[in-house]
Image (cartoon, coloured by chain):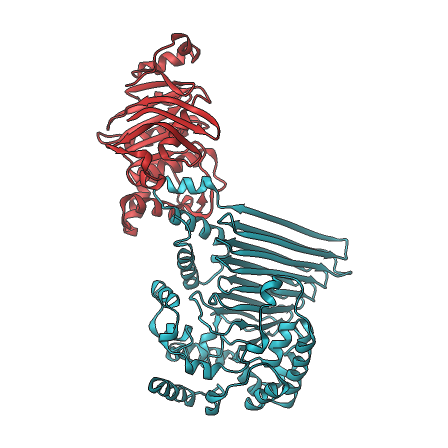
């Protein structure tokens, strides 16, 4: 009890310093009832002092969520096991407060140890502390961004401080009616990032959520909106390779990207939720004329991930790329893929999907390439490679092509392979143990993804793959 | 020492009673027609899972080699230069070499020291720098693959090197370079088993012992001069000789 009071006090201290964050003290003691009702949504919006239009947006989304049936595709067994009445929709502060380091599962702590995660970061990742203690380090980065006129805030602050920009773009790429989980997020979203890059500005360092003072960046229903004005460039990175422990079983984010003419957005995700988590995410980008959008998406954790980053190529010569990797360990299902919608002439897209299944792990590639009539001279290439590490492991591919224009170039290639006996033998004949050899093959398989990551992420990911492989073989 | 070795691949017995003894410092050449069982012997020595030993034994430094998994055999000093090295996409040659050297020596080699050693051997084998950042055997020419096998051997410093048709598919210059690489690793505490189809490489490497394999057994053994005799008279001559199973 005493410990909890102390932590409560600490949190208030942290909150008191906030310049941008919204941290009314009563938040920490707020806990919504189970299940989701209009009252809860209204209460949430009221507590955040939101404008009327946002409240309406939420309530409309709630209605859609309640009406929409569950998806009838994908891993329906796992999906139907979600109990929506058993989720607290706005509990973060209270929940964090209630968790102590002792409550963090041993397995997670051990992994932190082996990954060499610093103490402060561990507690943050495990949800023990609300804040990543790195304000000093990142202060100068934030100042540089401000000088360039870049806005980088948590979504709640973004709404408060830049309401007009938010109102103009929020929910335009992914309307609440898009799917059941987008509707749920729209009704109860909290946290996430808001990024606005002025025309012609190049943001040279990748933006990472923990540069922000506010830490509502790993929320259950986070909401991110990135707007790149004409000719600008920004690289946003979310997640980390360390396992993120969460007692919330459902995480459903919405990420909207808008690349205006000639802009370039790269969005990198490394997701490693703990293995009790449903990670059902809607990510979509609009690419206007001559714009370029890249999703670089790595999925390692969770029980079930369903995520199909999409790019709507709406202006001529827009270019989209999705590079995704998925690792499904025992009992996990990574259902990931990509969607490319070619709605303008001379647009081009590349999809590269790589997945690995271990033990009873299962990966699915689900992809769509759509070319609308009039979108002439479209080029698209899709490549999916699946690697199976065990006899029980499973991988499926569900590619869909809807091509309503003749003058297009579409390539599709898919491979499924097992870790080759000959490759293993070759490496083992050089003295590598079976586990080391398998890890090396797996790392090599992921290399096209890893080399796209900033160095520190690449190093961590390699290490993580090694950990994932340990004990699996030999 | 290999004693009465029987090896089966799938349901077919390929080796039926091979006897061969190799001492430290010796260079042996194992010759024979395609399909006579030469490569099978090399895989069995290294412990390939599809090559099932159904009888006999292999003793290495007094140990029962057949009890050891492949990686342990490698760490104990046995090296196999593959006839057809496989590619490992996404794994750079330099990472692979470091891992192999670390496994053999049992400890991380300091980067600087490793680089220096690597450069020396690469120079001797005529391997360019950009080789290191390429993926292991991925898109390599035949000659590049064989050079990489020799480069690995030079770094790993095995006590028994088994070279499976390392000479095949090489032009004369590459053959010379590779042969020099092999000669450079011979020494009083190192042994070489050179498996070859042709006598060609033996112009550059002089074995003390030559064995001829036929139908899964060693049909004939002799000194270095046997290779020349084979070159002149062909493998049919061995069949006619009907020499008893040769143990050295």
Give the total number of marks visible in the rendering. 0
Q: Colour of chain B?
A: red
- Camera-side residue: B63 or A34? A34
Quarter of the image where one finds residue B166 = top left
Name the residue furthest top: B240
In the displayed image of the protein, which residue is found farthest to the left?
B188
Q: Quadrant of residue A267?
A: bottom right
Q: Decide if residue A228 is on the left or right side of residue B161.
A: right
Q: Position of residue A199 (x, y in %)?
A: 59, 75
Q: Nearer the viewer, residue B178 or A100?
A: A100
Could you tell me residue A193's position as x and y percent?
53, 77
**The chain coloured cyan in the image:** A
Image vertical order of residue B48 relative to residue A184, above or below: above
Res A333 quadrant in image: bottom right
Against A321, residue A224 (above or below) is: below
Question: The N terminus of chain A is located in which quarter?
Answer: bottom left
Please state the horizontal and vertical placement of residue A37, each as a whole percent of the image: 62, 84
**Residue A263 in view (yes/no):** no
Q: Residue at x 29, y 19 (%)?
A: B209
Q: Position of residue A106 (x, y in %)?
A: 37, 67
Residue A352 or residue B220, whichever sits in front: B220
Residue shown at 56% from the left, 56% from the top: A363
Image check: A221 left or right of B135?
right
The answer, for residue A364, to whether it is visible in the render is: yes
């Amino acid at each position: 009890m005493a410990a909890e009071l102390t932590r409560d006090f600490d949190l208030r201290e942290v909150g008191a310093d906030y310049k941008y964050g919204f941290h009314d003290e009563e938040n920490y003691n707020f806990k919504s009832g189970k299940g989701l009702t209009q009252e809860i949504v209204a209460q949430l919006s009221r507590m955040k002092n939101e404008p009327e239009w946002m409240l309406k947006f939420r309530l409309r989304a709630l209605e859609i969520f309640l009406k929409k049936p569950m998806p009838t595709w994908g891993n329906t067994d796992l999906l139907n096991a979600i109990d929506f009445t058993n989720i607290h929709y706005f509990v973060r502060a209270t929940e964090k407060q209630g968790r102590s380091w002792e409550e963090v599962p041993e397995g997670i702590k051990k992994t932190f140890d082996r990954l060499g995660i610093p103490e402060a970061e561990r507690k943050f990742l495990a949800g023990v502390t609300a804040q990543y203690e790195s304000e000093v380090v990142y202060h100068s980065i934030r100042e540089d961004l401000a000088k360039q006129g870049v806005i980088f805030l948590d979504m709640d602050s973004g709404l408060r401080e830049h309401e007009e920009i938010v109102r103009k773009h929020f929910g335009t790429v992914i309307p609440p009616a898009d799917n059941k989980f987008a509707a749920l997020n729209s009704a109860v979203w909290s946290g996430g990032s808001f990024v606005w890059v002025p025309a012609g500005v190049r943001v040279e360092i990748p933006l990472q959520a923990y540069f922000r003072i506010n830490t509502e960046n790993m929320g259950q229903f986070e909401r991110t909106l990135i707007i790149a004005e004409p000719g600008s460039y920004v690289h946003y990175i979310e997640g980390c390779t360390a396992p993120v422990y969460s007692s919330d079983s459902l995480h459903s984010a919405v990420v909207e990207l808008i690349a205006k003419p000639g802009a370039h957005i790269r969005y990198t995700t490394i997701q490693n939720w703990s293995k009790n988590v449903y990670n059902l995410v809607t990510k979509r980008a609009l690419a206007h004329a001559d714009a370029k959008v890249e999703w670089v998406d790595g999925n390692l954790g969770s029980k079930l991930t369903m995520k199909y980053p999409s790019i709507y190529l709406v202006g001529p010569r827009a270019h989209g790329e999705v590079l995704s990797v998925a690792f499904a360990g025992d009992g996990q299902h990574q259902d990931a893929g990509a969607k490319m919608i070619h709605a303008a002439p001379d647009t081009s897209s590349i999809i590269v999907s790589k997945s690995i299944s271990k033990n009873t792990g299962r990966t699915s590639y689900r992809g769509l390439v759509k070319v609308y009539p009039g979108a002439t001279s479209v080029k698209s290439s899709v490549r999916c490679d699946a690697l199976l590490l065990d006899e029980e492991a499973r991988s499926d591919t569900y590619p869909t092509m809807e091509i309503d224009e003749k003058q297009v170039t579409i390539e599709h290639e898919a491979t499924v392979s097992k870790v080759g006996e000959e490759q293993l033998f070759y490496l083992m004949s050089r003295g590598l143990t079976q586990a080391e050899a398998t890890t090396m093959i797996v790392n090599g398989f992921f290399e096209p993804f890893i080399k796209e990551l900033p160095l520190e992420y690449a190093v961590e990911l390699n290490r993580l793959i090694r950990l994932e492989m340990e004990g699996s073989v030999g | 020492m290999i004693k009465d070795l029987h090896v089966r691949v799938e349901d077919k017995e390929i080796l039926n009673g091979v006897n061969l003894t190799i001492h430290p410092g010796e260079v042996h050449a194992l010759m024979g027609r395609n399909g006579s069982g030469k490569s099978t012997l090399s895989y069995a020595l290294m412990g390939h899972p599809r090559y099932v030993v159904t009888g006999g034994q292999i003793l290495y430094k007094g140990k029962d080699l057949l009890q050891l998994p492949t990686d342990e055999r490698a760490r104990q000093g046995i090296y196999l230069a593959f006839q057809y090295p496989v590619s490992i996409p996404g794994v750079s040659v330099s990472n692979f070499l470091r891992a192999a050297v670390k496994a053999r020596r049992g400890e991380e080699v300091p980067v600087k020291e490793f680089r220096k050693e690597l450069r020396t051997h690469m120079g001797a084998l005529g391997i360019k720098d950009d080789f290191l950042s390429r993926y292991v055997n991925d898109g390599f020419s035949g000659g590049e693959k064989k050079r990489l096998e020799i480069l690995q051997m030079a770094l790993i410093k095995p006590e028994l090197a088994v070279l499976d048709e390392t000479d095949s598919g090489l032009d004369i210059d590459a053959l010379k370079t590779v042969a020099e690489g092999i000669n450079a690793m011979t020494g009083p505490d190192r042994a070489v088993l050179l498996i070859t189809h042709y006598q060609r490489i033996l112009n550059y490497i002089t074995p003390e012992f030559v064995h001829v394999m036929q139908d899964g057994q060693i049909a004939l053994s002799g000194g270095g001069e046997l290779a020349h005799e084979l070159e002149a008279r062909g493998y049919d001559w061995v069949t006619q000789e009907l020499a008893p199973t040769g143990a050295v």
